[in-house]
Image: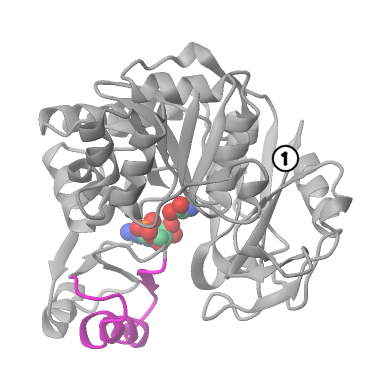
């Protein structure tokens, strides 16, 4: 099976590893890929979406997998272009990918289909933002567009709100787009992933990610500093409620709205005192949740995704391991405000009981891996209990380092 994966980060390294380790024989290519990914995948001869589609057609690819979101809504859309070229794609068309690309589109969808979520107002002026907040704090402000996880501010007071409003609406830090003022919701968060194939779906193992840079969930949001996954994170009752109130109405809503969907769908939920409420949809796997969840999947992941992309949801092709998986991210100096490149990473060969998925790394002229981005890599370990998985991931992570490395010390323990 010839498969192309779109993306270059830790999530894509994890997806490609899972495809590579599947019993079905695969020849994997990556676009744009990374030096670490090119150890198990080949580069694609492409520079943009049209040349990528031409490459897939010319080389008779069987499957295209959307790792990251941007190409889903770029130009005519990755899945739309694949469909026109007759190539099965795991990832939704542009129209459905608005669930992630536009927070206002997603909110309207949730309201239309009666899916529990916080109240909101969409505004485009500083005055309207202040009016919508109405002096009530904490308040949640979101830039209405793709911002790599950084377009959200939970503001404890007016000063924080004014700073974010100024960034989004006056200084246009993220470009053109409206601002959503959202009701603040309280409770533990959980990430739910489903494989959606038209009217059918399968819920995968849940996960929890750690978005703040600092221990104790302090400091600014990041792309994600770690994640935990286990089937034990949800009891049967809560799992059933999430399915009934959120996942099923979403899949039915997509059908009702005439939005075909094949691919992973991510539900970011807050488990409030009034029940689960949805914070956001993402039209792909989470990062870094994928790095924690995928090592828990058994069976034939490659065939599972291939069949799904062709319209055959096949839950029996995969299974989930018992126990826990913990993913610990190491970030470079200065992250998330900036990032530091060119620091040599040592100890990569010393890992024994964990795997590593590269995000912001590259090979230097001497063939050594060095830092090349904010989040540098994730170390992932499994264990029969959460405590064992946490101890193992930290023990293994201690073996790998680079100058200025930042990591949290409470991944897998905080919020449990
Ligand atoms: P999002 O990208 O929309 O998932 O938001 C990023 C993070 O901001 C979430 O994981 C939450 O920690 C926080 N957040 C988002 N929306 C809310 C909300 N309505 N109430 C409280 N926290 C929120
Ligand atoms: N872990 C959050 C995300 O992938 O958006």
Q: State which region is magenta.
A: 150-177
Q: Secondary structure at mark 1?
A: helix
Return the residue nearer the eye: 13 or 285: 13
Q: Is residue 371 left or right of residue 93?
A: right
Give the x, y percent position of residue 175.
25, 76
In this view, the residue in front, 97 or 190, is 97
Beta carbon of the mark 1 residue lies under 8 A of ligand 2: no
Residue 35 in the image, given as x and y percentages of width and height: 63, 56
Query: What residue appears at the point 76 percent right and 41 percent down from the top-left corner?
Result: 389
Residue lying furthest front: 58
| Residue 334 belongs to the span the image colors magenta | no
Where does label 1 land, which residue? 386
Please say whether residue 160 is one of the residues in the magenta stretch: yes
Q: Is residue 177 above or below residue 58?
A: below
Q: Could you say where residue 233 lies in the image, as x and y percent from the top left?
A: 57, 35
What residue do we see at 22% from left, 39% from top? Answer: 80
- Looking at the image, residue 118 sits to the left or right of residue 220; the answer is left
Q: Quadrant of ligand 1?
A: bottom left
Q: Is residue 185 visible?
A: no
x, y (%) of residue 371? 67, 70
Tell me the quarter of the picture where residue 296 sits.
top right
Please, which residue is most extreme toward the top here? 316
Is residue 24 visible in the rendered structure shown here? yes
Is 39 situated above or below 407?
above
Task: Write the residue at 58% across / 56% down.
Answer: 34
The answer to which of 81 and 168 lies nearer the viewer is 81
Q: Residues within 10 Å of mark 1 (few under 14, many from 20)?
A: many
Q: Quadrant of residue 299?
A: top right
């Amino acid at each position: 099976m010839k498969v192309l994966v779109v993306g270059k980060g830790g999530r894509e390294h994890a997806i490609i590893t899972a495809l590579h380790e599947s019993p079905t024989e695969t020849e994997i290519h990556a676009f744009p890929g990374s030096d670490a990914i090119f150890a198990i995948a080949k580069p694609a001869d492409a520079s943009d979406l049209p040349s990528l589609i031409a490459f897939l057609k010319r080389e008779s690819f069987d499957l295209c997998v959307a790792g990251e979101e941007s190409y889903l809504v770029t130009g005519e859309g990755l899945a739309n272009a694949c469909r026109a070229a007759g190539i099965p794609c795991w990832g939704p068309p542009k129209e459905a990918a608005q669930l992630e690309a536009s927070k206002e589109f997603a909110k309207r969808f949730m309201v239309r289909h009666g899916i529990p979520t916080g109240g909101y107002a969409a505004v485009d002026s500083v005055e309207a933002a202040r009016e919508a907040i109405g002096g009530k704090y904490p308040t949640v402000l979101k830039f209405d567009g793709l911002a790599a996880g950084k377009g959200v501010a939970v503001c404890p007071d007016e000063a924080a709100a004014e700073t974010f409003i100024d960034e989004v609406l006056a200084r246009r830090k993220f470009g053109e787009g409206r601002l959503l003022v959202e009701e603040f919701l309280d409770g533990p968060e959980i990430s739910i992933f489903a494989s959606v194939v038209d009217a059918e779906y399968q819920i995968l193992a849940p996960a929890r990610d750690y978005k703040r840079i600092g221990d104790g969930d302090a400091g600014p949001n990041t792309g994600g500093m770690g994640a935990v996954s286990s089937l034990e994170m949800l009891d049967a009752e809560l799992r059933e409620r999430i399915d009934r109130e959120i996942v099923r109405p979403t899949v039915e809503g997509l059908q009702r709205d005439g939005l075909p969907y094949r691919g992973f769908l991510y539900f970011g939920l807050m488990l409030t005192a009034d029940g689960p409420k949805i914070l956001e949809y993402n039209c792909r796997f989470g990062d870094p949740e994928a790095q924690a969840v995928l090592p828990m999947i058994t069976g034939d992941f490659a065939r599972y995704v291939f069949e799904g992309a062709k319209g055959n949801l096949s839950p029996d092709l995969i299974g989930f391991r018992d126990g826990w998986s913990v993913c610990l991210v190491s970030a470079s100096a200065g992250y998330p405000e900036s990032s530091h490149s060119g620091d040599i990473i040592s100890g990569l060969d010393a890992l024994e009981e964990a795997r590593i998925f590269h995000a912001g790394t590259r090979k230097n002229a001497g063939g050594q891996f060095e830092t090349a981005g904010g989040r540098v890599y994730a170390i992932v370990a499994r264990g029969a209990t959460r405590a064992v998985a946490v101890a193992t991931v930290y023990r293994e992570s201690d073996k790998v380092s680079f100058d200025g490395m930042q990591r949290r010390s409470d991944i897998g323990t905080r919020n449990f």
